[in-house]
Structures are given as C-alpha cells and as structure tokens.
Image (spheres, grey):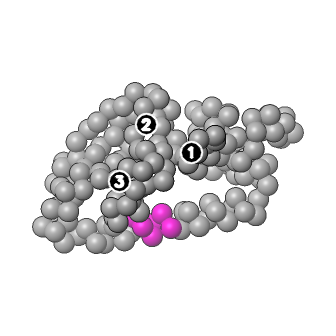
Amino acid sequence: DEFVNTFTVKSFKKGEIILENGKVENELRFLDQGIIREYYATTDKEKNINFFTDAGFITDFSSFAHATATKKYQECLTDVDLRVLSKEIFSTFTNQYNCGKLFVETIFQRIVVNKETEEFNHFVNTAEELYLDIMKTKPDWLLQIPQYHIASYLGITPETLSRIRKRI
C-alpha cells in the first residue's frame, strides 16, 4: 500500500507524446486508463512496436535502469491517466525496503520473455497469421486502435491489411 501511495496521478490528452527518442526515462509510469502506442521513428517513417490498452507498466525499463536515452516514442491515442513515480523516490523507497532489486528483476524478466516471443512471432509468421493472433489474443486492439496503426505494427500497408481483413 505504501508503495502504491507514492505514485502521483498524471493525465494526458489524446495526441500527447509522453516519451520521446533521445530522452532518459526518469519515471516509473503505470497505465491506469487509456491507450498508448509505442513506436520508433525516423524522419521519413514510423514503425509501431506495441500498444498499451490494459493496466500495467509502460516505462522503458532499459532507459530507466541504465539512465540511457530511449530510442522509442509513446503517444496517447486516447486521453490517458497514468500513475507516475520519479526515479529518485523509487530509489529511496527500494533502498529503504530492500525490495527494488527483486521488483526490477521480475519486470525485466517479463519484458525479455514478451519481447523474445513477439520478435519470434514477427519473424516466423505472415502478416495474416499475426493479424489472426491479434484477433485471438488482443481483440480490443482491433476495436480501439486505428487500422493504419495496426498495419504499421504488422509491417504492411493499410491497403494490404484491408485485403487480409476481407479474406478472413
């Protein structure tokens, strides 16, 4: 309870960028409500790598843990409510209660497993197979996220996604 109570609530509007390439992640951020897309961007293109629709941590833990610049962006696709904890307060809390190492290790393990699974699936499956998997495991994405963002996540054009949707 004490740990949860150390978080503050921040609200963001649709379209706001809450994480930007080149910045160091200095907060633990937990999604309470809303939808966030995570993506990489260059001057001429963007590639969606994840969507956050459920309650959970959305922090770039690599940047947070190592104080390195992130390569990611995160944008609010809807109005968003986050619970936020500064790295300084997190460090004080974890030093005081000696639980931070286990917390960070557990989160990192989960992230690594999820990332490896996702990378493997993107490597071995076709865009149609990936779309079918989204239909089965993340149907809320298809109801709440614009199709052009889903197409980017699948690595295809919106027109190709439209053809896939007509076939199935």
Q: Nearer the viewer, mark 2 or mark 1?
A: 1
Provide the secondary structure element on which disc 3 rests: loop
Q: Is residue 147 left or right of residue 14?
A: right
> Label 2 to label 1, Cα distance in Å?
13 Å
Secondary structure under tag 1 reads strand
Which disc number belongs to residue 24?
3
168 to the left or right of 121: right
Q: Amino acid at mark 1?
A: Ala
Q: Earlier in the sequence, mark 3 or mark 2?
A: 2
What residue is pinned by disc 2?
17
Mark 3–mark 1 CB contact (< 8 Å): no
Q: Amino acid at mark 3?
A: Val
Residue 103 magenta = no
**Above or below, 16 relative to 44:** above
**Comparing labels 3 and 2, the label whose residue is closer to the camera:** 3
At a point 43% along the width and 44% down the height, the residue shown is 20
Taking depth in this image into account, of 2 and 27 the one nearest to the observer is: 27
Q: Residues within 10 Å of mark 1 (few under 14, many from 20)?
A: some
User: Quick one: label 2 or label 1, which is nearer the N terminus?
Assistant: 2
Q: Residue 8's x, y, as percent? A: 22, 42
Seen in the picture, residue 92 relative to 42 is either above or below; the reply is below
User: How many numbered marks have been drawn onto this rendered protein structure?
Assistant: 3
Mark 3 or mark 1: whose residue is earlier in sequence = 3
Q: Chief secondary structure of the magenta span?
A: helix
Task: Name the residue: 70% across, 47% down.
Answer: 154
Residue 102 in view here: yes
Which residue matches tag 1? 41
Left or right of 100: which side holds 23? right
Q: Is residue 54 left or right of residue 153?
A: left
